[in-house]
Image: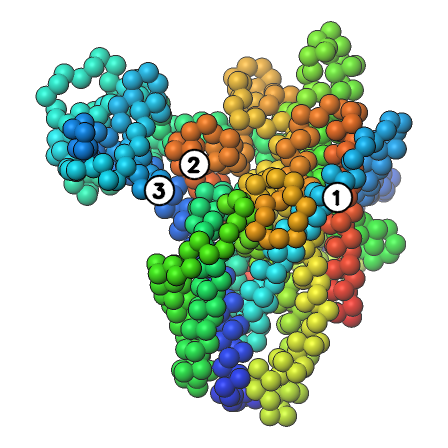
Amino acid sequence: MSVSLRAQSALDVAALVQSRHASRRRRERFGRLLAALGAATVVASVLAIPVFLLFELLSPGAVPDGTFGRLGVLLTGTLRASLLAVLVAFPVGLAAAIHLVCFSTPQQRSRWRPALDLLAAIPTVVLGLIALTWLAPWLQSRIATLLVMTAAVLAAMLGVSVWLGARLRAHPVHRLWVMFGVAALVGACVAAWDPLAGTVEVSSPWNGVLVGLALGVAAVPLICSIAADALQAAWDRHVDAAVALGASRWQALRSLVLPAAGTGLGAAALLAFGRCAGETMILLMASGNMPVASADPREGLRSLSAELALSLPGAERGGALWRTLLLATLILFVLSWACNLAAGRLRARAFS
Amino acid sequence: MIRIAAARRGSFVDDLGSGTAAAGLALCLLLAGGIVLLLVRFGLAPFWPQPVVEYTLRDGRTVLGEVVARRGDAWIVRSDEHARPGDGYLRVREQEIVAERSPPEATVNVHADGRRSYRAGVSDAPAPDVVAAEPRNALTFAGKLAFFAERLRAYAFGGDRPGDPGQGLLPALAGTLTLVLLMSLIVMPIGVAAAVHLHVYAGNGRVGALVRGAVGSLAGVPSIVYGVLGLGLFVHGIGGGIDRWFYAERLPVPTFGTGGLLWAALTLAVLTLPVVVATVEEGLSRIPDTQRLGSLALGATRGETLRALLLPLARPALLSAWILAVARAVGAVAPLMLVGVVKFAPASPIDADFPYLHPSRQFMHLGFAVYDNALTSPDALVGVPRAYSAALLLVVLVLVLNAAAGLVGKRLRDRYRSFPI
């Protein structure tokens, strides 16, 4: 099939060669112009955002008093939510990436990747819905239970891992299924037993912990895929030497691969932070939208993005609220752009 | 060989370390599976026939209806509705219940206006406006399954009865599809042109670096910022301009100067531009260089090579880029809230009146239906199940699109693996 395809293509091209020259040149120039127009549109759309924001903000008219205080509260809300999300998502994403890169065969990897893709594909409005209607009522009195559950699940997994030791070592698939079962079983047991219900007081069911969890779920696939890229590059470079010197996989990972992949992992965290800062639907639905300036994860929050989604449709164009919200947009744009740029630099350095 | 030996080597610390790593992946898989199961469970629950129960209370009253939720120590029971759907919810506290039974002949009467009424037996003559009488408690499992399948069919293909959870989702689905199709018409030519420029003309020079940087920056911009751009530049700027020039007689009532389908499609087009450019460029760069060089050696210009050879070969990449862009756009709700999505559109943006597609009209959207039903519905007992039904539909749509993109991409990769080079 491929051979005939090539022959056909060659004939097509030969036919073109025999066509008239002036019209060919004209067509060539026209095609080139079209392509350049497309590229120019891309560049223009990037430039349009800051140019539009600055143009509107610099046009005459005063920014109302107290704007910066209000935006400061929103900014702390955004930063707090993103930080909590990265704190939740980074360990999980990194561990998953380590397992994919260092303890799985390529076949297993290609089998598990779709599950992570699935997680990445779920629209954030759906995660927000689940956080709002399913997780929030449960979590309201059970933050302590959640912590106990995490610790118990982790301890049980590690216990089983050490107990079954050598039998699991060469079989990452078995290990994963065992872990899967242990996690589900212990988690369900702690949830049913619920030892510490009501020990941690929260001011509202929509609080920082809830936002961190929901936003963290959204960030896990991103962190995992970028961390896996960084780890894979470092692993390929170092593993043969380490193993030839007698190191086990874990020793190779800890002593050589993790330090070598450090910048790449930092880039993953930064990128996830920027993505979470710009995320809107989860924050709109799960954060309670109360402007509270506090670092306490048990308090609710209101983020820049949620403020935009809630207030901008009702803002009169050119009015005080409009300008305040455009300023908020500019802050959000600069924040995510800076995170992106820094992450890009880190990744470039990691792969050079 | 060396690596296999290393896999069997190891100690206590190794088991702890690799166990933690496996725990992380296990948690990811649990999350993915759990979320999908949760959506299926809550999204499909409204279609399953609930039994009719009769509670006898301590004060001698009896309550007949179906249990819909539990709040604290009380059951929420949907009971006879007299004036409008949703006015018959009762709160029955558990300690007030002295007896509970499910009358085997109980029926649910569905009225033409969506109200439900409950009868313990079949003896009374049904009211004239009853459109369906369901003997819920007499259903066998197969009967329940048939009921479930019938309701689901009505949900998917229309024909819903008033008061069903699928009400209003069909126009939302239609709005979503119209929106993404219009967006595709805008984004695909621009994205493909930009990718072609990058691959064929710009190369790795200064212009190429500029365009690549722009694509990278676009990918990192939060979606709500695109919404602000759409509102300020497209709606107020361009739309307001069109109104002043062409629809001045209708001002101050805006025609294009307010949120609408066209502006939402433009906004989503900018949002999905980086996906299209990156995917198409990758597809073009996967084509073996020998193809391009052969064509050029035969005297074809770059444009001719592109048209006759590269673009036809990269067709799967174009398809894959289109599907990925649509999948991204379907899930992007936040920017739409600023550029014209509404909870109920009086007129569909696509209808039988000339010119059939009305780009200035407001529209409904599945993702917004999720948000709106969950958060702003006056009746959470109706709104939340409806939100889950919409969410299930949305997730199925996105997952099917992503799976399709994956399959197409795989076909593309396989095609070039078999190239005899």
Whether residue B236 is visible here, answered yes or no, is yes
Mark 1, chain letter?
Answer: A
Disc 1 and disc 2: Cα gap in Å?
34 Å
- Dot 1 and dot 3 residues touching (CB under 8 Å): no
Closer to us: B171 or B14: B14
Q: Residue at x 47, y 49 (%)?
A: A140
- Name the residue beneath numbered marker 1: A72
Q: Mark 2 vs mark 3: which is more N-terminal?
A: 3
Q: Nearer the viewer, mark 1 or mark 2?
A: 1
Q: Residue at x 68, y 46 (%)?
A: A293
Q: In this picture, is B298 found above or below B76?
A: below
Whether residue B170 is visible here, answered yes or no, is no
Q: In this picture, is B399 found above or below A150?
A: above
User: Label 1's element?
Assistant: helix
Q: In this picture, is B367 found above or below A146?
A: above
The color scheme shown is rainbow
- Name the residue beneath numbered marker 2: B384
Quarter of the rendering occupied by the C terminus of chain B:
bottom right
Q: Residue at x 34, y 22 (%)?
A: B87
- Name the residue beneath numbered marker 3: B72
Quarter of the rendering occupied by the N terminus of chain B:
bottom right
Residue B163: x and y in percent read 36, 25
Closer to us: B339 or B328: B339
Residue B381: x and y in percent read 39, 33
Asked if badge 1 and badge 3 are on a common chain, one would say no
Residue A322: x and y in percent read 75, 29
Mark 2, chain letter?
Answer: B
Residue type pointed to by label 2: Val
